[in-house]
Amino acid sequence: MGKGGQNYGKSENLGAKSESKGENYAPWSKDLGECEEKYQVRLDRGLSSADVEERRLSYGFNELEKHEGTSIFRLVLDQFNDTLVRILLVAAVISFVLAWYDGEEGGEMEITAFVEPLVIFLILIVNAIVGVWQENNAEKALEALKEIQSEHANVLREGRKISIPAKELVPGDIVELRVGDKVPADMRVMRLISSTLRVEQGSLTGESEAVSKTTKAVSEDVDIQGKKCMVFAGTTIVNGNCICLVAQTGMNTEIGNVHSQIHEASQSEEDTPLKKKLNEFGEALTAIIGVICALVWLINVKYFLSWEFVDGWPRNFKFSFEKCTYYFEIAVALAVAAIPEGLPAVITTCLALGTRKMAAKNALVRKLPSVETLGCTTVICSDKTGTLTTNQMAVAKLVAMGSKANALRSFDVEGTTYNPLDGNIQNWPVGDLDLNLQMIAKIAAVCNDADVEKSEHHHVANGMPTEAALKVLVEKMGLPSGLPSGASSGYDGVLKCSHLWNRIEQRIATLEFDRERKSMGVIARSSSGKRSLLVKGAVENLLERSSFVQLLDGSIVELDQKLKETILGSLCEMSSSALRVLGFAYKEELTDFDTYNGNEDHPAHERLLNPADYSSIESNLIFAGLAGLRDPPRKEVPQAIEDCKTAGIRVMVITGDNKNTAEAICREIGVFGRHEDISSRSLTGKEFMNLLGHEKATHLKQGGGLLFSRAEPRHKQEIVRLLKESGEVVAMTGDGVNDAPALKLADIGIAMGIAGTEVAKEASDMVLADDNFSTIVSAVGEGRSIYNNMKAFIRYMISSNIGEVASIFLTAALGIPEGLIPVQLLWVNLVTDGPPATALGFNPPEKDIMKKPPRRSDDSLISAWILFRYLVIGSYVGIATVGIFIIWYTHASFFGIDLSGDGHSLVTYSQLANWGQCHTWTNFSVSPFTAGAQVFTFDANPCDYFQTGKIKAMTLSLSVLVAIEMFNSLNALSEDGSLLSMPPWVNPWLLLAMSVSFGLHFLILYVPFLAKIFGIVPLSLNEWGLVLMVSLPVILIDELLKFVGRRASGAGKSNARRYSKHKSE
């Protein structure tokens, strides 16, 4: 049994329930003996079966929690938690009850009456289905997180090595990790089997390259990047192998913390700015509908409730249930008229069209509302590695030796990717490489384990990114003249020069990199049989082990102190530019290895088996040159940053990389000025978290760009949370697991499509297909354009509804028969208005759309002036629809248009307004009239002329309503621009949509079955002439109002300029 195994659970240390399952213990700050004692395990023995069972009871399985999702029933109910939807639901229920009541009473219009509630119910059902489907897919980020966990682990238990499912690991388990393994839990490195151990943990920490690990303890309060003796669940071993002790499992690991943060962020998702505005509009609409319904009720109460005054008190009440029901139906019609039922469908259509436009620009939208949210983005919080930079190491500068001892040659290297054709070396002697440059190329190509392959549209590195960058450098250096050109025949890869150097210098032994000497060496055999040692590594370490320097012409001179200082000066210069610098050296006097060919029986082979001997082999080196590498910024990024500044969008860089590297990149891309003092703008995540609450808020409110380096997931979340609290609309970019919680929390999370992890993509609202920051800026411009177009059709639909409300209110106020019934209003709102509203989504974007500051998230959809304009337009719609109804009943002709062709009888306005008293009139008779193929007679009941006989007048009212709304859609092309400056043909889709809407109206007019459902009849040419004459003035009225608005706006801007000038003086 393992050491201390018998007493497991009795120890106050590992009992650990007092320490919340060991969560407070910091194994990275303890030496190896303390860790073994704490976890009561021996490194050579492992845990016993009893230990494992007991610990599993305490810690559970090594897996991430499954959070219970919202039930389908709850999701369905949530879809009705919307003011507009609730109003519609009440209206549908009431209209259904009234339709049922009319049917019971033997009413003739029951088909019409039932169409209305059924259509409203259908709208609500479709809306609920779409909402449930969208929300049911929301938590896939947590599932994707589980996929990056390791499935198996090689563990030592009871002295035997066994392979077990990773979920069965418990704290205290001893695990062996090899190259390519995915780390199964958070573990303390206890022993290195290889000379070096490197882990790719960038997806968790944001670091741009693999990190070397050690067994040495570090300070307890270091950040996650500083825990050099820890390996974390979900990361990958890229070099070496080791023995580790499991410290944390399941939800207590770093990846478990990310899981918790994603879940927490998903619980606090907020509505988009537009959704908030529409909810506010719905609440205001509820109040308005209530007031108008109450007014209609009060105005018409005399028709269904009367009484007499006896002794000063009301007596003998008379109540007409039929009349009460009729005016109740008018109230329902008001509700239907006031609600823009087609608005949700049109918004969804516009957003869907917007996603197609964005997809063409490499921005793939996963959640429709995020299209609109992009338009009001005020802050972009961007990850550095892979977003602002290429996430591909590239050589930026090459320094070679000159013709004299203290002369160095410096070459700037272009290119930001692993594509050898991406950029050249400036001032390069193409095809005329001197011996010094040949030696650098040879070392970079042969002392190298990486490869580069072409994958579809981009090049991919296999192996260490720094080594891949060196091989790309070799390709850019080219080959010297005189080398045998046929040496690389049969090779079809992208690294032809490197391949040729490896054919000329065959590698026969490798001196692995280790953290002590910080170099890697290879012994190569040339085609002539000569052995040489080629070395690359940290410049300072190579200089310590070098005695000579190779000059331009290949001659060798002694490395004196002055030359060493010259080389170190060049190193310092490159390091201050945040370049990672590697030196190149070689050795040709290899006495022990003169006859070595890789054979294990050779006497010198023993030296290669002992890493401690590598430093002596790599001594008396000849230094050849040095190269500066970096993860370079993308070419498009500086312009995109400048575009953000012009558009009033602040850019904050939040990265897990180190401060110096991040600052250098930020200066280069324009987040900071080249020589700007950034001491107050650049903080580490830890420094930011140590600020007081108000200091954090003040720091984030600074104008211009900000940088947060060495940031952990919780730091990113805190920054996003504080920005949102201060009213900013935050877009957050990221590609790693560590970015997922902040992506989920931000108003719009943007993941990388190529380099991004599945976790980041699932947590995001939008994915960049090209991983390019400039694509975000294009998407913001598209989002602004879409929002402007959405405002146009929202204004259009709301102004149309104001007109419908005005029409019904005027009808009720004047006491005339009902001119528009609910099913007609529903048809107009859903079908006739839909195509023009959707077409407004195709309005061309304004030319200066990205030169304006972002709109505030609390900006109103409709300003006071726009509301006034649409109240005027709405009033005209009401007057026109009611007016044409009255004209048909009271005039034989109007402005020269003959209306007597159908033979209908004329009545006075007084009779029309008091039609309810018709049964008391004496000698009242009505002539038959024709409508299409129908003849309407009223011999049995002349008073029916105001009920079934109003069908022609209703048709005229409906046709005027449709025509006015079509012409009003032209007014919506621009918020304040005249049709003379923005003519209808700038948006041909709108003209097509108007044709479609008129076509649909003709369809219900001239197809008998549909005409019966909607209670209308065909119109004659004269009647159409009257419809157009009454409808066209809506354009003139709005043009006049726009002109007044432009004059007032121009005067306001002029006064503002004068005030600003006076203030500056």
Image (spheres, helix red, strand yellow):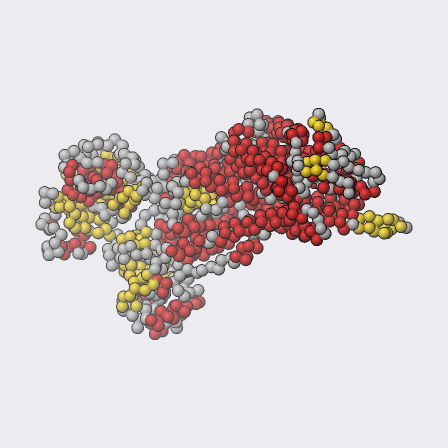
From the viewer's side, name the closer residue of 986 and 1042.
Answer: 986
Query: Residue 147, position in %: x, y?
Result: 38, 56
The residue drawn where x is 21% and y is 31% is 429
Does residue 436 show up?
no
Using the rendered view, name the quadrant where residue 899 is placed: top right
Q: Quadrant of the N terminus?
A: bottom left
The residue drawn where x is 10% and y is 48% is 594
Q: Is residue 140 above or below residue 873?
A: below
From the viewer's side, name the closer residue of 682 and 374.
Answer: 374
The residue drawn where x is 16% and y is 54% is 608
The residue furthest bottom is 6
Q: How many marks?
A: 0
Query: Residue 856, position in %: x, y?
Result: 55, 40
From the viewer's side, name the closer residue of 843 and 1029.
Answer: 1029
Q: Quadrant of the C terminus?
A: top right
Query: Residue 384, position in %: x, y?
Result: 39, 44
Query: Residue 216, position in %: x, y?
Result: 30, 57
Does residue 206 show up?
yes
The residue furthest right is 311
The residue drawn where x is 32% and y is 71% is 48
From the viewer's side, name the closer residue of 179 and 549.
Answer: 179
With 1014 as the anchor, is 62 left or right in this view?
Answer: left
